[in-house]
Amino acid sequence: MNSLPPEPSSHLPESEVRSVVRRAHHEKSKARDKHRSKAQNKGRKIDTIDFSGELKPGELTQLSEDCKSGKITINQLKRLSECFKENDVCEKFLIADGCLHGLTGQVSGKQWNKQILSLYCLVNLSAAKIKSHQIARASGPYLITHISSSNTQLIELSLTVLVNLTQSKDQDTHWVLHNQEVLPSVLKVTESDSESIQELAYNVVYNMLTNSDVEGESLIPVTELVTSRLDKKPAIHLLWLLYCLSSNQMLHSSLYTPQLINTVMQIATYEIFQKCDSRPLVKVLTPCIRALSNLCAGPQGVEVCLHLLKHPEFPPIFTAILSTNYSSICQEAVWWLGNIVNNENLQVQEEFVEMELMEKLENPAFQAIARLDPYAVSGS
């Protein structure tokens, strides 16, 4: 009679278990990225399978020379695009004299297939975050021209290059893009009917606001854009733009309207209670909570707090957020509540008491703080 194998007498140490889990998550992430890239290439009618692999001796030199002379072929552009996924190849190409200008020359050329492929090259080249200011200076005018065109693929690829460039912390890159008036051009693109184009455009604007010193009159059209578009099925990056603008207290008088507060609360209500998936999206709720919290603590804070306290969805939204297992959302909610409770205006304090919000929110807030920092309530 066969017996079952004995059960293992010991378990892996916790550190090894965590290491295995991290490695599994990393492998899954790589697999998802690979499948996503493959699907994108298939949808864009570009197959790079035949052009992958390590560079042969002298191949990069030949590709660079052909690119510089303008004689580069379609297959060579595909090969170059694939090679630009390696940072050291990008650096060698950018150091070589005249190569970048040869590539941008293809972007502005008359052959549409070479235009598309050269933009793919610029997408991968700009993603390396190497000499971003040189790429911005050489390609910026052509990218602005393409995002004003009617070709969806050219617009998406050009905006993707700008997303990569504006993610750079290099202030020279942002100075070049600012002088090329990229921001006004991208704001016009947000009027597109394509959601993917809108998302990319909002991403460019958000990067420019967070990574550079955009201020003054340049922010007025961005503020008008956010306040006018927020009530129309807002894209995620539009919500992050709202949060970014709310961090500047000089803009609060332009941002705050009862309609804007109601719209943000409606977005939060839908995300928590009304959509089919019961799990709230952190990337949606986070900018909503942060924007409202900033407005509560700003020069219009009294009006914002009073409007929120009288909002019928305020107690259930707060209770749900404080009770969530997402610690980051919970932490943002505690910060938001603190900005309201600590408002020194007597009318706000009286309203808070009159609405009996302390009784409704005290226990969820206590539990939330206990989860975030057990030592904070250990003496209670």
Image: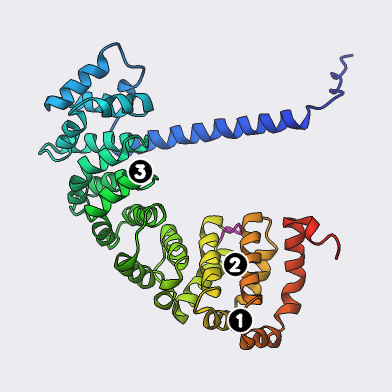
Instruction: Point out which mark residue 309 bears.
Output: 1
Q: Secondary structure at mark 3?
A: helix
Q: Is residue 14 above or below residue 265?
A: above
Callout 1, which amino acid? Leu
Crowding at mark 3 (Cα within 10 Å: few <14, some 14-19, many 20+): many
| Residue 375: percent from left, percent from top | 80, 56
Whether residue 86 is visible here, answered yes or no, is no
- Nearest to the observer: residue 238 or residue 100: 100
Q: Which residues are magenta?
A: 276-280
> Quick one: label 2, few (<14), some, or many (20+) residues within 10 Å?
some
Q: Is residue 204 above or below residue 111?
A: below
**Closer to the camera in the image, 192 or 14:** 14
Quick check: 334 above or below 145?
below
- At x 31%, y 53%, the residue is 197
Residue bearing the label numbered 3: 164
Residue ID for mark 2: 273
Q: Position of residue 373 (x, y in %)?
A: 75, 56
Image coordinates of residue 3 in percent, x first then y, are 88, 17
- What whole-number distance in Å separates the C-alpha atoms at marks 1 and 3? 41 Å
